[in-house]
Image (tube, rainbow, N blue to C red):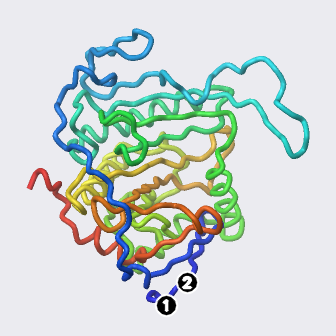
Amino acid sequence: MLNNPHRRYNALTGEWVLVSPHRAKRPWLGQVEKLAAEALPAYDPTCYLCPRNERAGGIFNPDYSGTYVFNNDFAALLPDLADGEPASSHPLLVSTPEQGLCLVVCFSARHDLTLPELDLSAIENVLNTWTTESAKLAELDYIHYVQVFENKGAMMGCSNPHPHSQIWSQSQLPNEIVKELATQKEHFNKNNRPLLLDYVHEEQKRKERIIFANDHFTAMVPFWAVWPFEVLVTAHRPTAYLNDLTANEVSALAEVFKQVTSRYDNLFEISFPYSMGFHQAPADGQPHPEWVLHAHFYPPLLRSATVRKFMVGYEMLGMPQRDITPEVAADRLRSLSEAHYKHR
């Protein structure tokens, strides 16, 4: 089956992905992307995220050393609703107001150190910052979902190379959360166990897609992965929010993040681009026994540092499709050194 075209069901979203392993043998190598410069300075006087530098509107960053959090100067969501009614009340032309608050989180004062190049204590500090800021946003009465995410690299639309992430909070649930909430609730109501706990237990038995695991988290290329080297990081117990994690679990999660991101960089010996985000339960004040905290890594690179996968044509019009199987991708990542290539 693994050498022939087949579909795989994504139990977390209720969608399907087409897998075509035989296409990996075709001669076309894809578009060649120009590699970004790797030699970044520790401090860049022109960077609007570095300490002491000026941002939009004449705001100056403090002389920070650890993480630094501020309201996004060009936020996609605003805390105050503008006056006026929705654009239309027609059943086919529906719009509703949306409130929110968007934050930027700089990982450190260093302009040149991405997550895999930080030490474990610095990664823990980033995780603790995401946790604290998520909890504060969730307490706002108009916020019902908090999304922590990082876009790494210009290929993923990151406009500034200074390592940073974002936190968007909003009054309605995003599409992906609506899908994951429905599947996890359905599974829990049928089995009285969280879907992701049952899934990770099955992956632990099979081991073919697991990249790294410790006592509290497992990182794997999911059975239903769409992106070539996609990774799912899942907690080992029902934890709805980052704020539910113990100190030991935060340390364990930092270890997993360093393992995954170091292997990413080692794959093609570049600063590996990706979009990463945590999926927490809705911030609706309701219990969510069905939910297990997890993070998705979606990287675009396919065969080398210059060949990426595009979601076009059939993927846009039909369904997602991949060539190399998740098992092959997991084997490649698992075989890589956990030590970052710059430090070897």
Name the mark on residue 1: 1
**Which residue ends up furthest to the left in the rendered image?**
344
In depth, the one of 152 and 141 nearer the eye is 152
- The quadrant of the picture occupied by the C terminus is bottom left
Q: Quadrant of residue 193?
A: bottom right
| Kind of element beneath mark 1 | loop
Q: Which residue is mark 2?
A: 6
Instruction: Tell which of 278 and 161 is nearer to you.
Output: 161
- How many circles with numbers are drawn on the protein? 2
What secondary structure is marked by label 2?
Answer: strand
Residues 18 and 182: in front is 18
Q: Earlier in the sequence, mark 1 or mark 2?
A: 1
The amino acid at mark 1 is Met
User: Distance between the Cα atoms at labels 1 and 2?
Assistant: 7 Å
241 displayed left or right of 302: right
Q: Residues within 10 Å of mark 2 (few under 14, many from 20)?
A: few
Percent position of residue 307, x then y: 34, 62
**Residue 194 is at least partly visible in this image:** no
Give the residue type at disc 2: His
Which of the 4 image quarters holds residue 259? bottom left
**Relative to 254, does residue 161 appear above or below in the rendering?**
above
The picture places residue 61, in percent across and down from the top left corner, at 33, 16
Q: Residue furthest top?
A: 58
In-image side of 38 versus 147 (left or right): left
Residue 97 location, x and y as percent?
A: 75, 30
Q: Residue at x 70, y 31 (%)?
A: 98
Label 1 with label 2: CB-CB less than 8 Å: yes
